[in-house]
Image: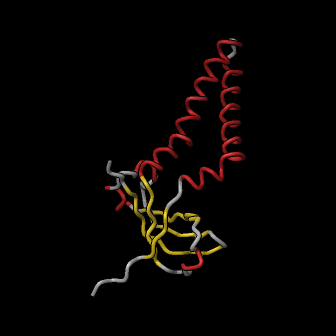
Amino acid sequence: MYEQIICHTGRVKAIDGRHVFVTILQSSACSGCAAKKMCNSAEAKEKDVDIFTSDAASYRVGEEVVLEGRLSDGRKAALVAYGLPLVLLLMALVLAIKLTGNETLGAMVALGTVLLYYAIVFLFFRGKLQQSFSFRIKTLPPPSQ
């Protein structure tokens, strides 16, 4: 099966231990990208990306690099960030309204459920998610003459 890759060119902003911080420019040129809906690339803007790599020391601040990510990782990240919370919100809302008969209380319970979901993801799964939904970093090849 063919794996779609998302590529962004960026510049190394900082290096801290095994983390390389890269600034990428998202622009309307991304409109042809298969992952444009997940990148929020409606207009040009700079984004900082934290890349975890064991060879961070081999990069230099100001160096141009290419970031590569899998489209499937973007889809999984969207599911964790938006899909699951939406399902939880709707289930909690319907269940709370059915049990209490109070729509206001149902809405508060549903929002509390989503807040609890994000807190659990942040506290217990943040590291695992950062490693599974990460870009790979590569140096740009020298220009051909």
Q: Is 31 left, or right, of 14 in this rendering? A: left
Q: Is 100 left, or right, of 67 in this rendering? A: right
Q: Which residue is at a point 59% across and 70% down the rendered structure image?
A: 54
Number of labels in the image equals 0
Q: Residue 143: image x %, image y %?
A: 33, 83
Q: Residue 16: image x %, image y %?
A: 66, 73
Q: Quadrant of residue 114?
A: top right
Up-down: is 58 above or below 113? below
Query: What colour scheme does the image use?
Result: secondary structure
Q: Which residue is at a point 58% across and 25% down the rendered structure image?
A: 90
Q: Residue 124: image x %, image y %?
A: 70, 45
Up-down: is 129 above or below 104? below
Foreground residue among 89 and 7: 7
Q: Quadrant of residue 30?
A: bottom left
Q: Which residue is at a point 54% across and 70% down the rendered structure image?
A: 22
Q: Residue furthest left?
A: 145
The quarter in which the C terminus is drawn is bottom left
Q: Residue 86: image x %, image y %?
A: 56, 32
Up-down: is 51 above or below 83? below
Q: Which residue is at a point 53% across and 75% down the rendered structure image?
A: 12
Foreground residue among 102 and 79: 79
